[in-house]
Amino acid sequence: GDSVTQMEGPVTLSEEAFLTINCTYTATGYPSLFWYVQYPGEGLQLLLKATKADDKGSNKGFEATYRKETTSFHLEKGSVQVSDSAVYFCALKDRGSQGNLIFGKGTKLSVKP
Amino acid sequence: ETGVTQTPRHLVMGMTNKKSLKCEQHLGHNAMYWYKQSAKKPLELMFVYNFKEQTENNSVPSRFSPECPNSSHLFLHLHTLQPEDSALYLCASSQPDRDSNEQFFGPGTRLTVL
């Protein structure tokens, strides 16, 4: 079945460091891909998405490129801030399915000043 | 009104109590979801409703009983819960006929079962 694999956390960085959170997926079709973020005490918010190969999703300085050849959707940010401390979830939705999302386990990011 | 609201935000209940969680969405979506988020475990999809019809039940124990009276409201009725049911319960909604099917989440109800 379809699945999403994220790098294990927690990830601890200093402010202004470069961030990469790896995400790879397994899917039978051509899924849409998402990154969600969960700030402490809150629900999940969509951070960015990409619906087809080579699309780049971007928001708030975060980027991720849909790489079909490597089945990956790695999240990157050039310079993290303390306010980026949160849990990040990679997810996919297979085309033609009911529409249910399949989530990775989440990666906790802590940014120190 | 914010997109997806959940009440209460926090709930403490004993194992013999009966309580209900409420979710309301103001986005005009036709699909609604209940998820369970426990510490150190992946997000677990519990129930899915499309156009008020339940389309998925991921082997959830019968002590959790969902109800979807219309496309905007979703309830989760709780009875005789166990301490291991303590978790953050998240509601989400989406428009399933859109290609990306982006889900919008509420803030969650933090449930503690004593």
Image (tube, grey):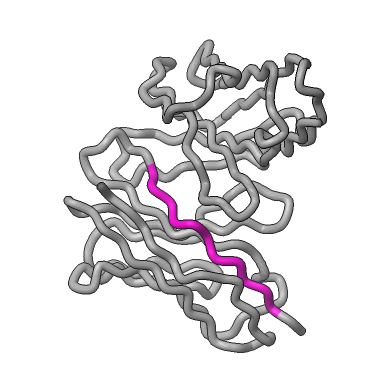
The magenta segment? A101-111
Q: How many marks?
A: 0
Q: Nearer the viewer, residue B13 or B10?
A: B13
Relative horizontal placement of residue A91, taking residue A39 as reference (left or right): left
Q: Which SS does the magenta portion mostly show?
A: strand
Residue A109 located within the stretch drawn in magenta: yes
Residue A104: x and y in percent read 44, 56
Q: Which image quarter: residue B86?
A: top right
Q: Residue at x 38, y 26 (%)?
A: B56
Q: Give the residue at the far top of this rendering.
A: B69
Q: Which image quarter: residue A87?
A: bottom right
Q: Taking B100 as reference, is B1 above or below it?
A: above
Q: Residue at x 42, y 45 (%)?
A: B102
Residue B91: x and y in percent read 57, 34
Residue B63: x and y in percent read 60, 18
Quarter of the image with the C terminus of chain A in it: bottom right
Relative horizontal placement of residue B27, taking residue A96 as reference (left or right): right
Residue B5 located within the stretch drawn in magenta: no
Inspect this view and state whether residue B7 appears. Answer: yes
Q: Taking B104 as reference, is A105 above or below it?
A: below
Residue A29: x and y in percent read 17, 51
Relative horizontal placement of residue A76, taking residue B107 as reference (left or right): left
Q: Nearer the viewer, residue A67 or B3?
A: A67
Inspect this view and state whether residue B30 appears. Answer: no
Q: Residue at x 70, y 71 (%)?
A: A83
Q: Residue at x 30, y 53 (%)?
A: A32
Q: Taking A35 as reference, is B17 above or below it?
A: above
Q: Which image quarter: residue A22?
A: bottom left
